[in-house]
Amino acid sequence: MDDRLALTLVTGFLGSGKTTLIRRYIETDAGSETGIIVNEFGETGVDHSLFVHAAEQVELVEGGCLCCARRSDVSEAMYRLVQLSRSGQKFRRAILETSGLADPAPIIATLSRDPWLRSNVRLASVVVVIDAVSGISNLNRQAESRRQISAADTVVVTKTDMRSALPLDDIIANVRAISPDSRILDANEAGFDLHDILNGAGLLTLRYQSIPMEGEFHSQDVGSFTLKIKERIDWPAFTIWLSSLLHAHGDRILRVKGLLRTSSSTTPVAIHGVQHIMHPPTHLPAEGNPDESFLVFITRGLDRQVISASLTRMLDWNSTAKA
């Protein structure tokens, strides 16, 4: 049983409604068992003052967005929260709210590269909040907004009840153009369940049924595509290839995920990585075994053909070596 503190990373562009969602959640019975880290862009934090009844739970990281702050700020705040969770408060989960200008990838890297954090904190989900009024405009104009969406496994659309809101279908189409497999939810829908999103249960395991198997998606400098692999993959050869690929193009590969049939396992293997950071592979139940492997890439300024050709060379070389 994984007894690490489950962390949900909540991000989204300025004014999207992140704080409102978190405040609604911690006002519930389940939310009261949640530790919170708030990051505020600028010299003085304000958002943490909104969590009045949960003041003892809140850790504030000031002085700029997390992607620009000293990495020790994040580590120290998480360390204090874990210590609190083990000294009588017994948090069941934690939420880290980034500033609206944060790129989630360096934050995820901090959690993955710090040995102590890796042993004590489990990244359960990356939730991005986008509002129905200015969200599409932000995606078109702000690179930070596109990077946030590219890292998400769950996207929450807010302000759909406002008169100036754009059609939900248009927002979904723009999100899918960047992150085709994300779960997209309307915060104003009758069945919207905040606990399902923020409870730390985790959705980072691939939502395979929702990943489009055909077509490519592009939004300005960000694009996504799926590569299929019919034969079983040699796992050692694949890991060497993927490590080399990320080393060569890591800054331009925003996310890679996939479901693989390997020669060393009878069950499918799920992989998931953000830029240079790969999460440990997950072995899934045999009944989920696909007919063929596939990899989903979300890239910035990197053509599909470059990765496809590299993958083909690896597969061809591996087949020749076995012959």
Image: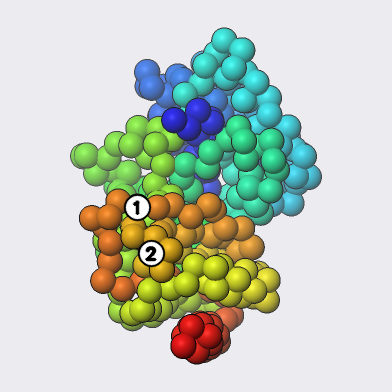
Q: Residue sitting at 70 percent across and 43 percent down? A: 114
**Which residue is labeled 1 in the image?**
284
Mark 2 or mark 1: name the one nearer the start of the chain: 2
Q: Amino acid at mark 1?
A: Leu
Residue nearest the viewer, comparing 198 with 18: 198
Residue placed farthest to the front in the image? Answer: 323
**Which residue is labeled 2 in the image?**
259
Q: Can residue 160 be seen by looking at this rendering?
A: no
Residue nearest the viewer, comparing 289 with 146: 289
Q: Residue sitting at 54 percent across and 53 percent down? A: 279
Relative placement, left or right, of 125 versus 165 is right
Relative placement, left or right, of 284 versus 320 is left
Residue nearest the viewer, comparing 278 with 162: 278
Task: Tell me if residue 124 comes above or below residue 295 in the rendering.
Answer: above
Task: Tell me if residue 256 comes above or below residue 6 in the rendering.
Answer: below
Residue 100 location, x and y as percent?
Answer: 58, 49
Residue 290 location, x and y as percent?
Answer: 28, 66
Check disc 1: other Cα within 10 Å, few if <14, some if 14-19, many if 20+.
Answer: some
Relative placement, left or right, of 212 versus 18 is left
Residue 240 location, x and y as percent?
Answer: 60, 71
Secondary structure type for disc 2: strand
Secondary structure type for disc 1: loop
